[in-house]
Image: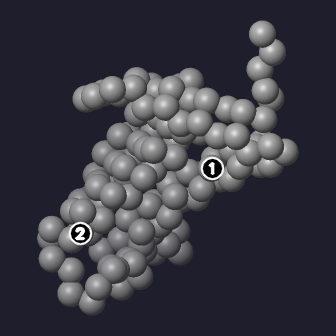
């Protein structure tokens, strides 16, 4: 049986529920769509790194007065979206995705707690 090369179906095991299946039938633009998803995943990781390691005045905010709950929801949402994008992109390497997302969260939290004013500021002052 021949498969349609423009149709892609990804099934990932559900950790707390049923399996998750993503289907796409995009015709000629299918390959470009998956490349854009991969680029969005890596750009999301780069943005999270920038937002975490920049100085306090340069960190992005949704509102002018954020409570701890809003900050926690922002972080959880950012890492959840990052995990979904990486899982869709690298569906065959789920251990790589888990290691990348959880490892980056742990490493960035450690850097942020070690240098609360911003690791990038510390790095720039140290280099000069």
Place of residue 7 in the rendered image (x, y in percent of width and height, measured from the top left):
72, 33
The residue that appears at 53% across and 74% down in the rendered structure is 128
Q: Give the residue at mark 1.
A: 37
Q: Helix, strand, or loop for circle 2?
A: helix
Neighbours of disc 1 within 10 Å: few (<14), some (14-19), many (20+): some
Comparing marks 2 and 1, which lies closer to the viewer? 1
Q: Secondary structure at mark 1?
A: helix
| Residue 87: percent from left, percent from top | 50, 37
* Location of residue 32 with respect to 6 vertically, above or below: below
Q: Nearer the viewer, residue 124 or 28?
A: 28
Name the residue rendered at 51%, 46% in the picture: 85
Q: Earlier in the sequence, mark 2 or mark 1?
A: 1
Residue 50 vs residue 29, the one in the foreground: 29
Could you tell me if residue 35 is visible in this image? no
Percent x, y of residue 119 = 39, 66
- Name the image quarter holding residue 57: bottom left
Say which residue label 2 marks. Answer: 71
- The one of 52 and 72 positioned closer to us in this rendering: 72
């Amino acid at each position: 049986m021949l498969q349609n090369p423009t149709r892609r179906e990804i099934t990932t095991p559900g950790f707390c529920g049923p399996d998750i299946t993503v289907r796409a039938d995009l015709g000629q633009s299918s390959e470009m769509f998956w490349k854009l998803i991969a680029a969005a995943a890596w750009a999301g990781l780069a943005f999270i790194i920038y937002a975490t390691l920049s100085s306090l005045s340069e960190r992005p905010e949704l509102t002018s007065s954020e409570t701890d709950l809003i900050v926690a929801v922002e972080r959880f949402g950012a890492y959840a979206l990052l995990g979904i994008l990486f899982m869709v992109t690298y569906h065959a390497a789920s251990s790589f995705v888990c290691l990348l997302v959880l490892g980056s969260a742990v490493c960035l939290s450690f850097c942020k707690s070690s240098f609360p004013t911003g690791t990038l500021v510390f790095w720039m002052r140290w280099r000069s």
